[in-house]
Each structure stands twice: as structure tokens, then as C-alpha cells.
Amino acid sequence: MRTSLLLIRMHAMDKQTFPALNMEQWTTAVPAPESAAGTALDLVDDDPTPASMMVENVIDSMPAVSAPISSIMDKTLWTAHAEDTIEQVEEILSAQGLSSVPVVGSNGAIVGMIGIQELAQFHSEKKNAKVVRAWEISRIKAFEVSPADTVEDVAKLMADHKIENIAVTEFSRLQGVVSTQDLVQVILKEMTDEPTAAGTNAAPETAAK
């Protein structure tokens, strides 16, 4: 069953942490940055990342979910400033155990997202992490959704764009972040609730006379 296989793959991935890397799937090695933050970002894959493939598997096995995305988003807010260097962004990710971080401008409005995909691409180009700024590599397309958007719609958006994290914003202000792990938790809950619902709706047996 596809859902079971997905859950096995996701079992070891904690919320908002770096996914495990399959060394045989990664093709181009780049030198590790001096800071510890870069150690999980040293390899670049030509194919979609494992986490991106997981998103697609999630959608394939996901029932229609009409709840607002705000009901499952992570409300712990960590951000990077648009003018932060990539070295500073990686320090934030490392210190907080995150796999992505929203990027905000001088007015406090969110302007993009930086995650494993953006950092992997950056390091593959062997650019200087002490010089390049966050705004230069942040994802500026498909990086935000509204709190009222449904879980189903957000999940499909993430699958279509092969992204592992997305920001939830209202009037350009960050409200939370959603990851693939959040979506898996929704599936787990629904799988757990289904037998209960079936038992609740079953007709009671008539006592023998």
C-alpha cells in the first residue's frame, strides 16, 4: 500500500528537520562550508529530491481535506532578513534545527523562502556564502498561501512545485510554516479516525430476545 510505504519512509524524519540523504542518488559533491550549518547541504541531486517525491506520494494517497491550512501550520516563527548573508541563513537553520526559513524585507513583509533546494543549488554554483545575500537565492514563486486555503489545495500546490515547505501569510505577514511532515500527520490522523468513524456509524446490533 502506497500510504504504508510513505509512512515508513517518513518515520525517521522529524518535523522541520533535514531529510536523510541517499548518497548513491547524489551526483555532485561540493566543499562543506566552514560553519556547521552547511554539513547537510554538501551534495546536489540532478533528480527531484527525496522529500519532493514524498510530497507527490502524499497527494496520491491523501483524501480530500477541507480544513484550513492554519489548523496544521507550525506557528513557531523563525525568519531570515533579506540582507542576511547565506552564511547567516545557514547559521539560523543549524541553530534552530530547521530545513527552511522565510525571508522578510525591511518592512517586515515576507519576500520568499530559503530551504534545502535553494541552498543545494547555491552550493553547487560554488558561490561565496559570506557575500551572497538571502534575497538573491530565495524562492519567490509559490512560497506563500493564505491561512484560509485548504489543506488539500496547499498539498497539491506543494506537489506541483516539488517543494517541501511553504509559508502561511496574511497581508504579507508571516503566520506560520507548513512542511511535508505536517501533511503526513494529517494522513495519519485520518487513517486513525476512519475505523472509529465506521464504528460510530455502524447500526447497533439488536439484542436477542
Image (spheres, grey):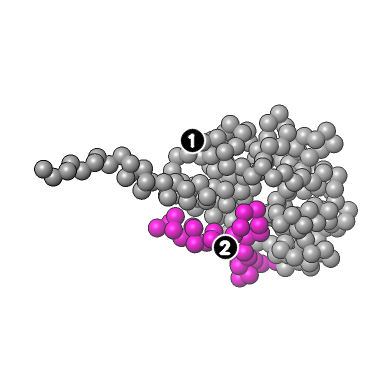
| Highlighted magenta segment, given as a residue range | 1-28
Q: Residue at x 85, y 36 (%)?
A: 106
Position of 87 compared to 29: left or right? right
**Could you tell me how far apart the alpha carbons at marks 2 and 1 are, in whole angstroms?**
28 Å
Query: Of all residues shown, which one is farthest toward the front?
Result: 209
Q: Residue at x 49, y 62 (%)?
A: 8
Q: What kind of element bears circle 1?
A: loop
Q: Which mark is residue 168?
A: none
Is residue 64 placed above or below 180 in the rendered structure? above
Q: Position of residue 63 (x, y in %)?
A: 43, 43
Q: Which residue is mark 1?
A: 66
Position of 114 compared to 3: left or right? right
Whether residue 144 is visible here, answered yes or no, is: no
Q: Quadrant of the C terminus?
A: top left
Q: Which mark is residue 12?
A: 2
Q: How many marks?
A: 2
Q: Position of residue 206 (x, y in %)?
A: 18, 41
Disc 1 marks a residue whose amino acid type is Ser
Q: Position of residue 91 (x, y in %)?
A: 80, 56
